[in-house]
Image (cartoon, coloured by chain):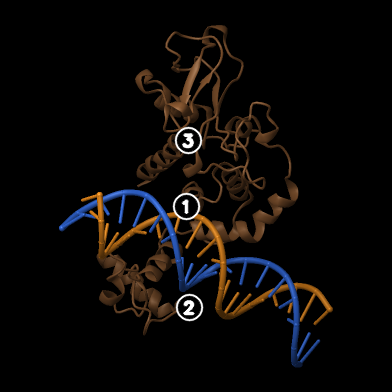
Chain colours: A brown, B blue, C orange
Amino acid sequence: MGRRPCCSKEGLNRGAWTAHEDKILKEYIKVHGEGRWRNLPKRAGLKRCGKSCRLRWLNYLRPDIKRGNISSDEEELIIRLHKLLGNRWSLIAGRLPGRTDNEIKNYWNTNLGKKVKDGNQSSSCSQNPMATVPIPRQDSNVVRAKASKCSKVVFINPKPQMQMQMQMQIGNTEAETAVMEGSGNDNGFVSFPNGETDMLIDFNVGDVCLSELLNEELLPDGMFSDELLKEWAQTNFADQDNASTNLHSLISFLESTEETQTLGQS
DNA sequence: AATTTCCACAACCGCCAGTGG
DNA sequence: CCCACTGGCGGTTGTGGAAAT
């Protein structure tokens, strides 16, 4: 049994939207709100697929859309975020108010992708002697939630009293648990009192070294600041009964801060 | 001026995750 | 647990306009 298509393709308009269609869609959403995209075309009297309506609304008709003229600041931010997040356009777009994932994706594919490729074949996690996980792709330093495994911990300027053993679960089984050597507390776990240490988690998932990104000051001020990362670290490590973690938490954290920002704006 | 090539971007497609019955 | 529905995401394609020949 195959998946039911989102709509019957017969008798539907395709290709570029007309001003008239845009008007119908805008007015319908103004009255009825977003959602229920499958039924929307029929109710609104549009000869379009529901998905197409959704896309049109999200990418072009929403009132808060900012179009064209991506500034150099935005461009720089996109590059940094792409280095951190990879092709997660919706997440990147979430950090750029008024920009859509589609616009950023297109901009990357036509401009930044080439630019970055030309100008950057430099450092990689693989050059770090601590790296143990093979790197599947060399062309980008990205975090991929599905492949996330935390493989190392880096202490930057560790204070003597903060040197400790650290255990992190890097997989689902006990066999996949890594113990970071060093001196530390008895139970092998670590907590992060406010401001007590400069500690970074290195997600060597074959794609990214977070500490490398930070050391290169790739992360923009106020975006993934030290405070933000410390907050994340506390969230994920302060509970000593549950000190295991993985990269999902970072992605989730970024997404949650995004939601918070969104809520704060509205 | 006509034709070809290149580029930007809007739109489509297929897949996946979340959710509710 | 299974299944269908829905919304969302990222990759890819199609097309119109600009630039080059």
Q: Where does residue A8 sit, x and y in percent of width and height?
A: 34, 78
Disc 1, SS = helix
Badge 1 local density, few (<14 within 10 Å), some, or many (20+)? Answer: some
Q: Where does residue A45 sit, x and y in percent of width and height?
A: 29, 79
Q: Hey, what amino acid is under mark 3?
A: Leu
Q: Is residue A155 above or below residue A117?
A: above
Residue linked to disc 1: A90
Q: Hey, what amino acid is under mark 2?
A: Gly
Asked if disc 1 and disc 2 are in contact, CB closer than 8 Å, the reply is: no
How far is the residue under mark 1 from the one under mark 2? 23 Å
The residue that appears at 55% across and 25% down in the rendered structure is: A200
- The disc, 2 or 3, on the residue closer to the chain's N-terminal end is 2
Asked if disc 1 and disc 3 are in contact, CB closer than 8 Å, the reply is: no
Task: Specify the subunit that label 3 lies on.
Answer: A
Asked if disc 2 and disc 3 are in contact, CB closer than 8 Å, the reply is: no
The residue that appears at 56% across and 47% down in the rendered structure is: A86
**Hey, which quadrant is residue A29 in on the image?**
bottom left
- Which dot, 1 or 3, sits closer to the camera? 3
Looking at the picture, tell me which residue is in the foreground, A112 or A261.
A112
Q: Is residue A92 above or below residue A172?
A: below
Residue linked to disc 2: A15
The residue that appears at 58% across and 43% down in the rendered structure is: A142
* Total numbered labels placed on residues in the image: 3
The residue that appears at 44% across and 79% down in the rendered structure is: A14
Residue linked to disc 3: A247
Q: Where does residue A32 sit, x and y in percent of width and height?
A: 25, 66
Q: Determine if residue A104 is in view.
A: yes
How far is the residue under mark 2 from the one under mark 3? 40 Å
Disc 3, SS = helix
- The disc, 1 or 2, on the residue closer to the chain's N-terminal end is 2
Same chain for mark 1 and mark 3? The answer is: yes
Disc 2, SS = loop
